[in-house]
Every structure is written in C-alpha cells, then in structure tokens.
Image (cartoon, coloured by chain):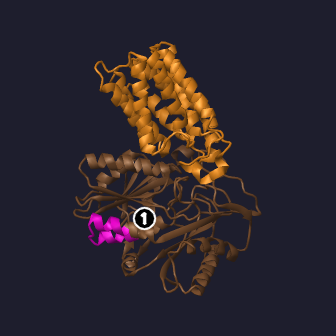
Chain colours: A brown, B orange
Amino acid sequence: MKKLINTPEREVDEALAGMAAAHPDLIRVEEPNIIVRKDAPRPGKVGVISGGGSGHEPMHGGFVGLGMLDAACPGAVFTSPVPDQMLAATKAVNGGAGVLHIVKNYTGDIMNFEIAAELAQAEGIEVASVVIADDVAVKDSLYTAGRRGVGGTVLAEKIVGAAAEAGADLKTVTALCQKVQDNVRSMGMALTSCTVPAAGKPTFDISDTEMEIGVGIHGEPGRRREALRPADEIVEMLVTPILEEGIFASGDRVLAFVNGMGGTPLIELYVAYRKVNEILTGRGITIARNLVGSYITSLEMAGLSITLLKLDDELLRFWDAPVKTPALRWGV
Amino acid sequence: MSGALIAGWLRLAASRIAAERVHLTELDAAIGDGDHGINLHRGFGALEARLAAGDFATDAPGPLLVLAGRTITGTVGGASGALYGRALLRAGAALEAWPGGSVVTSAQLAAVLRAAVDGVAALGRSRPGEKTMLDALVPAVVACEAAGATGVDVASALHRAADAAEAGARDTLPLLATKGRASYLGERSIGHLDPGAVSSALLLRALADAAAGGA
C-alpha cells in the first residue's frame, strides 16, 4: 500500500482537522467527528444533514455550507457513522423547524440513521428521512439490500439544501428530496481497485486489460467484469441501462453528472461527457445543466459514474440557487 | 449471571476478536466490504479500555450490558455496530426489568437471549436463512430455550447455545445472501461463510467459556 497518510487510524481525524483549518469561514468540526455549518443552527430553518463512510470526499463534508448541507457525519473509511454522530449533528443544526436526514441506501447507514432518528425524536426534535437509492447496477428486488445510493445523493443534497435555505418547511423539503430520488438514476464503472487504509491491500483484483461495469462506490462488484473498451463504448454501457429505466424521454430536460471515482483525471471525464452529450442529443433529450468532476469518490479508484436527473422548473431553480461550500460554489 | 461474569465475558470477547480480526476481515472481503474484523476490533477494544479504566460505575449485569451496548453502538459503525449494540441493549433492558436483575435459571437466560435476538431481527428486518448473524443467533436461542425447558444449569445451556451458533455459522456456507452488502453478489455469495454469523458464534462461545470458568 502506498498512500499519503501518517497512520490509517488517524487518517479521518487528521483530514477533518485539515478541513476545519482550510475552511473556517464555512464550517466547524465538533466532537464526535461531525462537520457543521459555521452559522448553525439557523432559527426557523430546516436542518439538512447527511453522512456515510469516509473515503468518498468531497461528499459529504465538502458539501456543508450555505445552500447545501447543515452538517455531515463521516464514519471510518467505507464504514457508516455511528448514531452518536447523527444525533449530535441533528441537535447542532436544529433551528426549531425540524431536521431532514439524507441517507444513502446501505444497510449500515440505514440502521445507524434509524437509531439516531429515534433518539432525536425522543429529545423532541422532528426528524424526517429520505433514502437515496439510484444505482441501476443493482437489481431492486426482495433478494438484495436494494439499490445503492450513489451520484444522485450529490444532486439531492444541493437541491434540497437550496430549498431549506429558501425557507421551505420540513414536509416540503422532504417531498422535494423524494422527488429527486424518484427522478435520478446512476451507474458506475471501475478501471482499478481502491485500497482501504486499514485493510492495506486492494479491495478487489482487476488486471490491466479488464474493467468492472456497475461497480459501487466501495469497490463492490458490479454487473459484470469484462475486457477494457474505448471510452465511447463504456459510456454507452452506462447510459443505456439508465435510459432503459423509463424515466427519461425525448423532449425532457436533464442534469447530466459525469463523476470521477477518485483516480480518473478530468480530461478523461470530459471525453466521457462528450459522448454522454452525443447520446442524449441523439435521443432528443436536452442537457439543461451539467456537473463534471470528482464529487463522490471511492478513494483512489479509477473509473467514473454517470448520473441523470430529470429536471423541471422547480428542480432547475433550486439547482441554480446560490451555494457556498468547500466543494461546490456558485451564485455567491 | 453476575456483573463480574458479564465483564469477564466482554474482556474475553475483546481478546478473541483481536486474535480473529484478520480472519473476520478476510471473510468479509470475500462477500462484503472487508472491514468486519477491523470494526469489531475497534469497538471491543474501546469497550475493553473502558472496563479497564473503571468507566462503568456499576456491578449490576443489566446496567453493565446497557453501557456496553452504548459503547458498541457508538464505536463500531456499520451494520454490525448497530446490530450488536442493539442486542446488548435489549439483553440489558431484559435483565433490568427483572426483580434482582440477574439470570438464575437457564429459562431466564433463554428469555434474555430471545430479547436480544428479536432486537437484531427487527432492526435488520431479517430472518434466518438470509446469510446473516441471525443464522447463528437464532439456533443458539432455540437451543437455549430447549435447555431451559429441561432445567439444566446456565453454564450448560450456554455451552449448547454456543454449539448451535457454531453449527449455524458453518451452515451459512451454501446460503444465498439476500441482506446487506453480500446481497449485491447474488449467487456469487454462495460458498462463503457469513462473517457476521461467524463473529456471533465467537461471541457466544466466549460467553459460554466465561460462564464455564466461573467468572
């Protein structure tokens, strides 16, 4: 293992200390390892929090700030945070209007957020939860834990955060988050594995001539392993299953999100975006907004994911609204 | 079942998890995300440190289990932290609800284990046969209940429960995972042991050994 760390045990704590030092105008870091918006709680504003294992930076901590999350709870690398963190974050951002938990669909995240929500409600804080499950690589059936929450989470956090900033109440914010979930789909692929620092070796073995189609953001297996192909063919393999979901039709406007997994350079993401644009244009679908970059990563894994969100005027308005966080900034 | 036995069990469990952490992590790497041993070791290590530091100002078994449950919930993370924490909290609550707050008969022990395992099943929305820790825990409770009905002593009942848990963990090998991260693998999960079932059996064997040692 070759990593720019001191020790695996201290990596998360030291990264949080670095974030706090880098962005004191936007965030503060509090015990037990939560990243809180500098001016939280804001009286009368719905609090929006999320959380998950570390190793996906900038998600979620990089999205704390004006117009996005009020707090983020990072767990150990690829391990869900604990209820103590979500409870502390919920209390730290509660301005009296309730708190929304945005939860990615992983067994550990679901259980730990559920326990935290029970504890917060017992303390008199109104809590709502929405589960993001947008990864079309996983069959959504009784025989799986259900679809994983991936790229759609970033878009949900931006849009929902903007609505909360504009003063929407908890019921409205929750319904909006569910609307994003209902209209967003993603799929990813990997060229190389990632290495969890505490494990010390690659999560999976993959040769120089292979790729994993449908990979998760923890290096979980996807739909299939196959021979490496040119970028255009890879993009086809990811966009086609998303379009087969029956959500996107000719005449629709979408937000297209081409996301790097952590080890893929921006030049390759633009090669992919070019093809995404070509495919969607050919189908009569308009890319009204886009996001290209590495925002939900899997440590140093090379690869990308593609996310499409069907837009309407409401989603477009909240996407365009001002945001000022360590990782996303516009309009301010 | 005294507070000293509970503390002795938790210390024994912590040392066995430390010894088995690489094995548990390897089992998890095959069908999950490869951190089961790492996470349990972090949590049980924290629990051991708090016991050694005298952080838990109680000798009563019920409150001790509740404090242990909070520690595990707050330090392990992932699904296993939530589930083992819930099991300890429910076991502690069951003990606290009784006059005297302790287990005297194997029938009482069975009721405590049942409360713990029902808590795991409810939080995980799972049942046996889905390749999870319940495949070790439920046979253990059933064995303990059978032992309780015949009136054997607590140590013997725990021994049978641990045997049943180990058999249950072995029997996860051919199962298809339908819960947790292993479910993403579909049929590729067949032929591997479930790491949660293996760690559940480890914890119950440690409890049986602690009880047999008269701790």
Spot occupied by residue A17 in the image (x, y as percentages of width and height): 44, 53
Asked if one can make out residue A291 in the rendered structure from this viewpoint, the answer is no
Task: Say which quarter of the image contains residue A240.
Answer: bottom right
Depth order, front residue of A181/A144: A144
Residue A293 position (above or below residue B146): below
Regarding mark 1 in the picture, which secondary structure is present there? helix
Residue B149 falls within the magenta-colored stretch: no
Q: Disc 1 is attached to a residue of which chain?
A: A
Q: Which amino acid lies under the numbered mark 1 shown in the image of this protein?
A: Phe
Residue B142 left/right relative to B28: left
Residue A298 position (above or below residue B174): below
Residue A140 position (above or below residue A113): below
Residue that mark 1 sits on: A63
Depth order, front residue of A9/A22: A9
Spot occupied by residue B124 in the image (x, y as percentages of width and height): 46, 44
Magenta portion: prevailing SS class? helix
Other-residue count near label 1 (Cα within 10 Å), few / some / many at <14 / 14–19 / ≥20 = many
Magenta-tinted stretch: A159-176
Task: Say which quarter of the image contains residue B164.
Answer: top right
Rendered residue at 44%/69% (across/down) = A182
Spot occupied by residue A73 in the image (x, y as percentages of width and height): 41, 53
